[in-house]
Each structure stands twice: as C-alpha cells, then as structure tokens.
Image: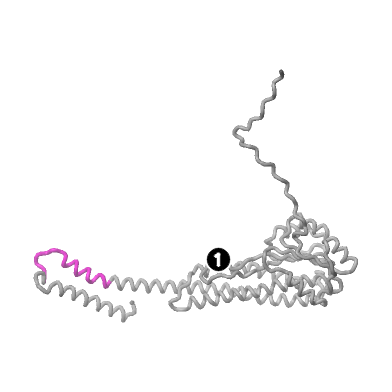
Amino acid sequence: MPSLPPLPSFRGQGRPGPVPRPKVPVPTARAIVDCGVYVDGARLPGHFTPAKARAQAADRGGFVWIGLHQPDDAQMTEIAEIFGLHPLAVEDVVHGKQRPKLERYDNTLFLVMRTVQYLEHDLDSTSEIVETGNIMVFTGHDFAITVRHGEHTGLAGVRHELEHHPGRLRLGPFSVLHAVADHVVDSYIEVAGEVEEDIDEMEEAVFTPNMKIAIESIYQLKREVVELRRGVVPLGVPLQQLTTNENLPVPKEIRRYLRDVNDHHTEVSETISEFDERLSNLVNAALAKISVQQNTDMRKISAYAAMAAVPTMIAGIYGMNFEHMPELRWGWGYPGVVALMVVLCVALLITFRRNKWL
C-alpha cells in the first residue's frame, strides 16, 4: 500500500488567518453632492450623470457644475477622465489639506482655498477654536467642479443663491469660481469676528482687577489665530493673480467681481494679523499681572511671618530654663508676657495695614 504524503505542519505558525476580501470600490455617485447643467443662466431640469451632463452642456452651449465631497482616488479618477483633468491636480484633490494656490493646466484653472469654521468654547478652555478644511475648484470652458474636504462651509446655499441670479450664470463657469471664492472669504470675515469677540473678552478679563484667567487660554487662542492666518492670508496671491493676470481665461466682468472679493480678503487678512499683536500684548499683560499678584502674596506671607516671629522669639527666650531670669517668679509674669506679645502683634498688624501689605 503506497504511503500517503505527510500533512503540512503549522507548528509555531498559528492558524492561517482569513483570506482578505477585495476592496469594493465606492460608486462615484456617492461623492457627488449635486450635478447640474446650466444653459443661458438657467438650470436644465432632471438628474444627470457627469458624462451625460457634459454631453448636454456641449449640445446646448452651456456648462456643467458638479459638487463633490471628499472623493477617493477611484471616484476622482473617473471624473478626471470625463473632463480631462490633470493627474497632478487630481492627486492634490484626493489628498486634501493643501495650501491656497492657483494653477493652470492648459485651459483649466485649479484654485485651492482653505475653509475655516469657528467652534463654540468657554473663555477659559484650551480646546480647539478654529477648524479648517479645503475647497478646490476646477474651471474650464464648459465645466466647474467644486471639491470640498471637511464637514463645514457647504456650498448648497451658494448654488441656490447663484441660481436666483441668471445674469451671473450667463457669464459661464467662472461665475461659479467667483461665487465660491466670495463665500469662502465671507466665512473668513465671520470667523474673524467671532475670534475678535474672544480677544475682547480676554482683554476685559486680563485688565479687570481681582479677575483671574488661565494664561494657557491666551496661548491656545494665539495658536488658533496662527492657524487661522495660515489658512486665510495665502489666498491673497491666487486672488491677485485672478484679478491682474490677463493671460488667464477669466472674463472681464468676472474680474470685476473678483476684485471686490480680493478687497474683502485684504481687509480680513489685516485684521487677523492684528490679532497676533493684540494677543502678544495680552500675554505680556497677563504675565505682568501674575508677577504683581505674586509680589502681593509674598508681602502678605512676609507680614504674617513677621507677626508670628515676635511671640516665637519671646517664648523662645523664656524657654531657655535659666534660673535667674527677669519676672520669672513674679505672679503677673505670665499674663504680662502674653499681653506684651499681643500688643507687639497688634502694632505690627497696624503698621502693615498702613503700608498696604495686608
């Protein structure tokens, strides 16, 4: 009878693990928030896939506006194949967390903007105050694609408002670029106003007598202002390019609207830069206030120590156990020494009170 081959040994290897299942790609429709076709300033009725939307726009002489939320690599690759997007820009979109910039790929503009959101918090807390995200806009001759990273600064309101102004939609897909940039800069102004209220409250707390504030809260707000400045200020260069570079395919009328957005951005950037200086002054004032409070506490401790030293000294002298000491056998010696201690302590107390040590 032929011998059977030996069974494979798994000693020291453990049981074989489960076979990993292949990752199922998520449909592109999951990342699409809205997809509309606009012709002569009006949106065409119905629902469209990106491919059908671009075909309709080409046939009717309009443009497509697609809104995406945090697409993955496969989803963004499909969109890129339909609209001919550059792979480098697609890579930036998938990774997210990009600095504000403007890039041109042939006839397509790629604008990256940082979004900010103010988080409610207590004045003396050290929690996060400003949350950041990204909005990226592709603009071509017949399409506008907006990609949002983060759960704030939604664009549904921007789309609805723009659809109520057909005159601006007739300017083409660059009207979407202006509307989104204007929305982002308006959110900067709103967040800057909220942060300014926090700084005002901290200034009031620091300069109010007998009111304590944790200096860690000032440092936290200063760090959040730095994060806000990093997200807001760099957008000034792309906006300046959009308004002054005539080689970019931006209509003249859109440039006029973008100049207004650039002006608002300049104002909010200057305001945020002032926040850093105000907070630095607040830190110095808070440290000075703490130093003064420490000096006051030390004077009080020194005064109480001096008052305690008088009876300690007298009691120490009479505790030496010498045989010949003044008033040692006097009947009123003990009450007299106690009265002397009290009188000296009261005299010191009055002196310290007059010098405002206590």
The percent position of residue 19, horizontal first and vertical second, equals: 69, 42
Residue found at x 60% / y 32%? 11
Check if residue 141 falls in the magenta segment: no
Can the viewer see residue 39 in this picture? yes
Nearest the camera: 142 or 56?
Answer: 56
Check if residue 322 falls in the magenta segment: yes
Q: Is residue 197 above or below residue 64?
A: below
Residue found at x 43% / y 72%? 290
Residue 132, picture quadrant: bottom right
* Residue farthest along the top direction in this orientation: 1
Q: What is the crowding at mark 1: few (fewer than 14 residues within 10 Å), some, or many (at least 20)?
A: some
The percent position of residue 27, horizontal first and vertical second, equals: 77, 56
Nearest the camera: 332 or 267?
Answer: 332
Residue 303, picture quadrant: bottom left
Q: Main secondary structure of the magenta part?
A: helix
The percent position of residue 77, horizontal first and vertical second, equals: 78, 56
What colour scheme has been applied to the protein in the rendered image? one colour
Report helix, strand or loop for mark 1: loop
The percent position of residue 179, horizontal first and vertical second, equals: 75, 73
Looking at the figure, which quarter contains the N terminus?
A: top right
Q: Is residue 11 above or below residue 98?
A: above
Judged left or right of residue 106, residue 131 is left
Give, as a single range, the part of the protein colored magenta. 306-326
